[in-house]
């Protein structure tokens, strides 16, 4: 249940991101859900590996490279998902930042009901 909840929160965050950032476009509800799933899978599987591998450059840039890494993973999700399009790599970086902020805020205010 928690996995589905997180998936829907990410879908809502992606929708808000597509409304705010001009270079981010999502075709429809089905494309939005598939894109949120792709972003979730990439973040769960690939991000930890790339974060570890790029740790030295992230330290050298005082953490700024982490934004590039997030943008790259966001861009990769757009490449694998039909109906999810990005204009530039900068829109991918901004989209990743906005999506992260929106998802965090949504997680703070919307919590799933706990089982008794």
Image (tube, rainbow, N blue to C red):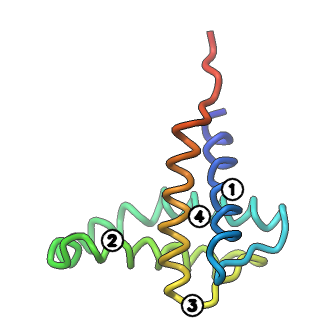
Separation of residues labelled 2 and 4 (CA atoms) = 16 Å
Q: Is residue 80 above or below residue 30?
A: below
- What is the secondary structure assignment of the residue under circle 1? helix
Nearest to the eye among marks 2 and 4: give it.
2
Q: Earlier in the sequence, mark 3 or mark 4?
A: 4
- Reading the image, the residue beneath label 3 is 88
- Reading the image, the residue beneath label 2 is 66
Separation of residues labelled 3 and 4 (CA atoms) = 17 Å
For image coordinates 62% across by 54% down, the residue present is 10
Q: Which mark is residue 39?
A: 4
Nearest to the eye among marks 3 and 4: give it.
3
Q: Earlier in the sequence, mark 1 or mark 4?
A: 1
Given residues 46 and 62, the one toward you in this image is 62
Which quadrant of the rendered structure holds the N terminus? Answer: top right
- What is the secondary structure assignment of the residue under circle 3? loop
- Reading the image, the residue beneath label 1 is 11
User: Residue most toward the front?
Assistant: 20
> Crowding near pointer 2: few (<14 within 10 Å), some, many (20+)?
some
Separation of residues labelled 1 and 3 (CA atoms) = 21 Å
Image spot of residue 66 (x, y percent): 33, 71
Q: Earlier in the sequence, mark 1 or mark 3?
A: 1
Q: Earlier in the sequence, mark 2 or mark 4?
A: 4
Q: Earlier in the sequence, mark 1 or mark 2?
A: 1
Occupied quadrant, residue 86: bottom right
Q: Dots 3 and 4: beta carbons under 8 Å?
A: no
For image coordinates 68% across by 42% down, the residue present is 4
Nearest to the eye among marks 1 and 4: give it.
1
Q: Earlier in the sequence, mark 3 or mark 2?
A: 2
Given residues 29 and 110, the one toward you in this image is 110
């Amino acid at each position: 249940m928690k996995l589905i909840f997180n998936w829907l929160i990410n879908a809502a965050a992606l929708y808000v991101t597509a409304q705010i950032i001009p270079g981010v476009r999502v075709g429809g509800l089905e494309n939005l859900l598939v894109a949120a799933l792709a972003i979730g899978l990439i973040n769960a599987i690939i991000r930890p590996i790339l974060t570890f591998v790029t740790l030295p450059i992230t330290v050298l840039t005082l953490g700024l490279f982490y934004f590039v890494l997030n943008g790259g993973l966001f861009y990769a999700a757009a490449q694998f998902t039909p109906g999810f399009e990005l204009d530039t790599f900068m829109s991918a970086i901004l989209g990743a930042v906005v999506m992260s902020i929106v998802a965090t805020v949504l997680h703070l205010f919307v919590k799933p009901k706990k089982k008794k």
